[in-house]
Image (cartoon, grey):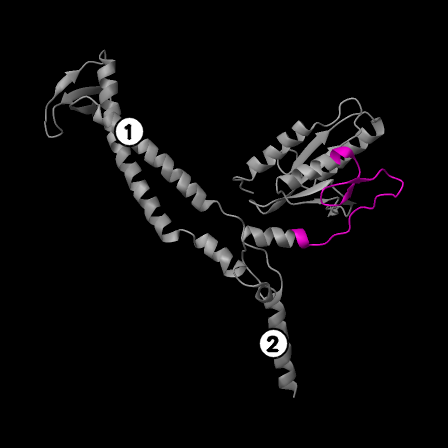
Amino acid sequence: MLQDKKTRQKEVSGITRTTSKRALLKPTFLYEEMRRRLEELKKTEAERSTLLAGAPEGEIHVLTTKRRTQFYLRSTKKEKSGKYISKKEEATIRAHLQKAYDRCIVKYLQKEIKNLETHLRASENISEKIRQAYSSKTQDIKKYLNPVDMSDEDYKRQWTEKTFKAKEIAENMPFYETKRGERVRSKSEINIANALNDHGIAYKYECPLALKNGVVIHPDFTILDLKNRREIYWEHRGMMDDEEYARNTVVRIKMMMKNGIVIGKNLIISEETAQCPLGTDEIESLIGEILQNQVMTET
């Protein structure tokens, strides 16, 4: 009886360990970078091969001693002697040295091209297969699995569906509602929220964020950077002509920076005053930066 109880405890413990949440694999841009590198190598190899085709005839031979370096021009590599080239003939020396360099570098480029093509053929779509091993399953099966990775669609869905308690807005405040039906605090925040939504960028409004010192803040917008599987934040400072408000926002930004939330890295700032409101063109420009940074960013 005692043994059976211990066995059941181990089994339960094992199930708990198996189903506990683990961090997903970090995003990788390995294959994108390999393909980019391959195209660059092919272009460079073609350019250098073209230069070689138009290079002058003959082979340069360099004789180096402790005292000096001399150059000789041979008709073939097998020729033992050669015509001495004076250093005054700089154009001739340059052309033949470049030819020798290009011939060498083309061989290396061709080897790396072959290596990359071989690796890509063997590894193509493996990252996607790892993701689809989970994401191709039905929801009834997914709920039992503890994945190492998943599709962007699943990641976005899980991030979006995670509930949170937003900061309350007093009833006597003006009522501004976004296209998604959420209430925000200003017209500018409506424009930001609607623009993010129109671009298909997942966001949460005033989602709580616990800082290292235990203080909980509510960034105006918490945005999912789907490509890099991270969160970035957008703070809109809407009353910068109010001294106390401006002072408080500076303190808030300093607190965020101490927690690794830095402007230009994972924090976006927009500002306005009563006389200088935030324009939709400015919002679109900032969103353009978000989308551009999602192309490829190592974290």
Q: Nearer the viewer, mark 2 or mark 1?
A: 1
Q: Answer yes or no: is residue 53 visible.
A: yes
As drawn, the residue found furthest toward the bottom would be 1
Q: Quadrant of residue 32?
A: top left
Tell me the number on the disc at residue 48.
1
Residue 101 position (above or below residue 218):
above
Q: Where is residue 190 in the image (x, y as percent from the top left)?
A: 74, 37
Q: Which of the labelled discs sits on residue 11, or is there none?
A: 2
Label 1 crowding class (10 Å Cα cut-off): few <14, some 14-19, many 20+?
some
Amino acid type, residue under disc 2 in the picture: Glu
Q: Magenta segment range? A: 160-189
Please identify the quadrant where the N terminus is shown. bottom right
> Is 75 or 165 nearer to us in this picture?
165
Query: CA separation, marks 2 and 1?
Result: 65 Å
Tell me which residue sits at (65%, 52%) in the image.
159
Q: Nearer the viewer, residue 191 or 85?
A: 191
Is 214 left or right of 231, judged from the image as shown? Answer: right
Q: Label 1 is placed on what type of residue?
A: Arg
Q: Residue at the spot x=55%, y=60% of the render? A: 147
User: Of callouts 2 and 1, which one flags the residue occurring earlier in the amino acid sequence?
Assistant: 2
Task: Pinpoint residue 280: horizontal percent, then vertical percent.
Answer: 68, 29
280 or 75: which is nearer to us?
Answer: 280
